[in-house]
């Protein structure tokens, strides 16, 4: 998914609408507040860094990093720093953090183990790591209620998307492993939950932007035809489909 494409901004907005309430429910439960220091890994869009900045206030700080920071330019200043950064290849930002958070990031990182080590290393004693990642293999359907040909086509195109992801090295079962992974990294008080919507206007916005962003790959690899993609996009626009996302599994643990 190329963040330089215009559809990327649409996707980030839809993801924020779908998942920001879940993310900040966990952030607030962990007690992230005034004066604390946070690292937002793979920030993508601006919504999470801005929400963290509201919580830490003028005496705190938020470091937002990504390989491509195109969609976070303009939010720098005050308590927010933005840096181009590869979580698995570059040293962590200087200093230690009360919260390190990554949402829908590690499933796309080739060396997930190294990325995790670097994030844990960046925590201060007592600091929290909050990882949120998808598990497309746990709930693979775009239309869980496969009631007709439109839903069948939608699910076939979603299967094509999973094929593309797997071909690029994504671990489609990664989300469910997060509790074990955090315990293995030495974190304490590990807990997790999962969330996925099954009908939301933002699901339709996300699906349309995603399909437009990858349609050339679907066609090139014989996973769909242009006619099928146009038919699917028309169904999405019509509002007749009850669209879901893959479950997002949120897992948190504390550095002893």
Image: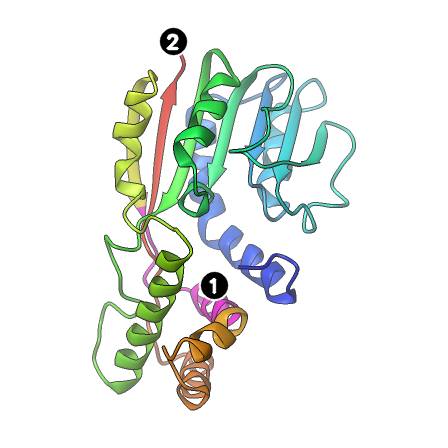
Q: Quadrant of residue 89?
A: top right
Specify the segment rendered in magenta: 195-211
Write down the quadrant of residue 93 in the picture: top right
Query: In percent of the image, x 45 and y 85: which residue is there?
Result: 234
Residue denoted by label 2: 256
Picture layout, residue 253 above or below residue 2: above
Q: Which residue is mark 1?
A: 202
Q: Is residue 200 magenta?
A: yes
- Describe the element under mark 1 as helix, strand or loop: helix
Whether residue 137 can be seen here: yes
In the rendered image of this protein, does residue 169 appear above or below residue 182?
below
Q: Position of residue 131 (x, y in %)?
A: 41, 34
Camera-nearest residue between 47 and 222? 222
Residue toward you, 163 or 98:
163
Instruction: Judge whether residue 199 can be spotted in this image.
Output: no
Residue displayed at 49% across by 70% down: 214
Counting from the top left corner in percent of width and height, residue 94 is at 65, 18
In the image, 31: left or right of 66? left
């Amino acid at each position: 998914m190329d963040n330089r494409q215009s559809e990327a901004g649409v996707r980030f907005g839809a993801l924020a609408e779908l998942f920001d309430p879940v993310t900040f429910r966990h952030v607030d439960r962990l007690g992230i507040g005034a004066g604390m220091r946070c690292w937002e890994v793979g920030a993508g869009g601006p919504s999470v860094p801005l929400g963290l900045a509201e919580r830490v206030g003028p005496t705190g700080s938020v470091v937002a990093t990504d390989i491509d920071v195109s969609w976070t330019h303009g939010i720098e200043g005050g308590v927010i720093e933005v840096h181009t950064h590869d979580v698995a290849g570059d040293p962590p930002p200087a200093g230690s953090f009360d919260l390190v958070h990554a949402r829908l990031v590690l499933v796309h990182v080739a060396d997930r183990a190294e990325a995790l080590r670097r994030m844990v290393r960046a925590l201060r004693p007592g600091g929290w790591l909050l990882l949120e990642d998808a598990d497309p293999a746990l709930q693979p359907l775009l239309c869980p209620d496969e009631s007709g040909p439109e839903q069948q086509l939608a699910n076939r195109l979603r299967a094509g998307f999973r094929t593309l992801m797997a071909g690029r090295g994504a671990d489609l079962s990664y989300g469910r492993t997060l509790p074990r992974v955090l315990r293995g990294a030495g974190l304490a008080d590990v807990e997790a939950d999962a969330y996925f919507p099954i009908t939301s206007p933002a699901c339709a916005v996300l699906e349309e932007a995603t399909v437009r962003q990858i349609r050339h790959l679907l066609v090139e690899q014989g996973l769909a035809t242009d006619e099928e993609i146009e038919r699917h996009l028309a169904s999405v626009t019509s509002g007749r489909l009850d669209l879901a996302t893959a479950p997002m599994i949120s897992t948190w643990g504390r550095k002893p």
